[in-house]
Image: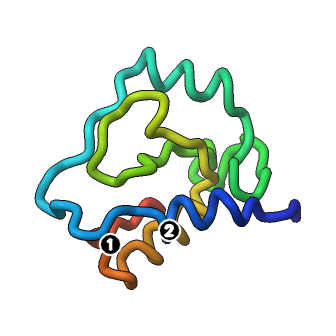
Amino acid sequence: MNNINWELFKKLTDDIPDGLSKSKKKATIQLKTRELVFKVDTVCKLCGAESRRDTNGLDILQIHHIIPNGDAGLGNLVVLCKYCHQVVHHLLYVTKKWRYVNVLA
């Protein structure tokens, strides 16, 4: 297991503005943007996990919106493995910063 990027972890969980509109949907990431993100970032930015297939044949790397209901521009996106992604969303939920999201389903 690689070292956790605690600075990024804090940014993704603590530094989220309070009072986000939980009814506003996140912006859809366009295919071209998605391809560019994965071309630049090939590992989880929190734990360093590399791209690989899970038991369902899906890549474990996913794209997370830094500001949950923010835009889908490169400055608001980060690559996380599905496990770190789920942890971030659980913490956002329990701290009442964002609604419940299950990225593993």
Tell me: 21 left or right of 91: left
Tell me: 2 left or right of 101: right
Near mark 2 (Cα within 10 A), the count class, few <14, some 14-19 or many ≥20, is: many
Which residue is outermost to the bottom?
94
Q: For the residues marked 2 and 1, what is the alpha-carbon distance in whole angstroms?
A: 8 Å
Q: Split into 4 quadrants, where in the image is the C terminus?
A: bottom left
28 up-or-down from 22: above or below: above
Q: Are marks 2 and 1 in contact (CB under 8 Å)?
A: yes
* x then y, percent, for residue 30: 35, 23
- Residue 105 in view here: no
Q: Quadrant of residue 11?
A: bottom right
Amino acid at circle 1: Lys
Tell me: 89 left or right of 58: left
Residue hosting label 1: 97
Disc with the residue nearer the chain's start (2 vs 1): 2
Name the residue nearer the viewer: 55 or 28: 28
Residue hosting label 2: 13
* x then y, percent, for residue 31: 40, 20
- Count of numbered badges drawn on the protein: 2
State the SS at label 1.
loop
- Point 26% across, 45% down: residue: 26
